[in-house]
Image (cartoon, rainbow, N blue to C red):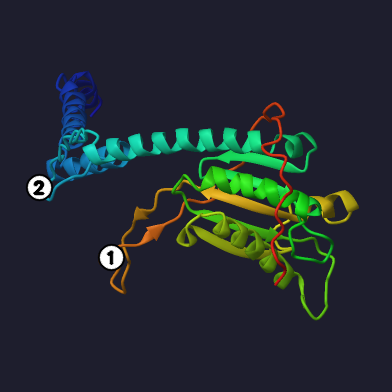
Amino acid sequence: MARRKRAEEGHENHERWLVSYADFITLLFAFFVVMYALSSVNEGKYRILSDSMVSAFRNVPVNSAGQLALIVPTPAPVTKPSLTSKTQEAVKQKQRESMRSIAKDILEVMAPLVAQGKVRVLETSRGVTIEINDSILFSPGQALIQPPLARAMEAVAEVLVGTDFPITIEGHTDDVPISNTQFPSNWELSAVRATTVLRLFAAAGIAAPRLTAIGYADTRPVEPNALADGRARNRRVSILIDSAIPEKGTEVDLQGQGESAAVAVDPAPAEAPVPPAPPAPPASTAAPRQLPAR
């Protein structure tokens, strides 16, 4: 028994390396299987993901086939100015020159009053505006032009009678209320004063269709009415020689379409005062004419 045990213990197994080799091969096989699984990607899903990211970051549309849609920008057409726009610009330029000439002529005939600060001549893109303080035109609460100013207003009418521009005469008051049998409120007072100047211009030869009279009462002050100076500044008559060219518009119907001639009036722009001209000698020594009261 002792000899047999010694013989069995003396026998050595030389194939145990196969076990380690088999384990190594198994691990190596598993490694390559994992590597292959990671390298195999679903091409369809990958393309969809890639196209979505490109579309999100570059704002490029993607078509239904999963391909990027290439957008070629269309060059904007170059428009050349039409003859109509050139003609209108030439007309506007001519009217601006006419307005400048009218402003100079009015400054000459109203030079003494401009020097006293009673009259202002303003040149705007709409035309020429003459602002006259009502203290030299009318007595307080009255609408008859005072004799000393009648001749000056006739001289202004003589300058305007040779033109064909529309003329708007605006009457303005301060916020002090008035109430009598002749003028129940400042609305009637401002409107009658504007109409009085209109009648003088019409009598001087200016065509009636060119004339418009508007009474604004105290709704459009140029200075605060809190102080006496501001109220005196607000009591005025404004004469607007309008050079705006009416433009044709498009009438909008219920469907938002339709064509019809309409007149568009430009908004009143900011006013720029015209520098006063040197005082001119009196136009005539004859006694001024006074309009009859009505």
In the structure shown, which secondary structural element does the residue marked by tag 1 occupy? loop
For badge 2, the amino acid type reads Ala
The crowding category of the residue bearing disc 1, from other C-alpha atoms within 10 Å (few below 14, some 14 to 19, many at least 20), is few
Q: Can you say whether 76 is above or below 245 in the image?
A: above
- Choose between 35 and 175: the one closer to the eye: 175
Q: Which image quadrant is residue 248 in?
A: bottom left
Q: Which residue is mark 1?
A: 260
Residue at the farthest front position: 286
Is residue 160 found left or right of 275 in the rendered image? left
Residue at the farthest bottom position: 181
Mark found first going from the N terminus, 1 or 2: 2
Image coordinates of residue 246 in percent, x first then y, are 39, 53
Q: Which residue is mark 2?
A: 65
Q: Can you say whether 245 is above or below 292 in the image?
A: above
Please report the residue visible at 64 percent of the width from the left and 33 percent of the height from the top. Answer: 108
Image coordinates of residue 56 in percent, x first then y, are 31, 42
Is residue 253 found left or right of 227 in the rendered image? left
In the structure shown, which secondary structural element does the residue marked by tag 2 occupy? loop
- Choose between 97 and 6: the one closer to the eye: 97
Please report the residue visible at 63 percent of the width from the left and 65 percent of the height from the top. Answer: 195
Residue depth check, mark 1 versus mark 2: number of the one nearer the observer: 1
- Choose between 19 and 278: the one closer to the eye: 278
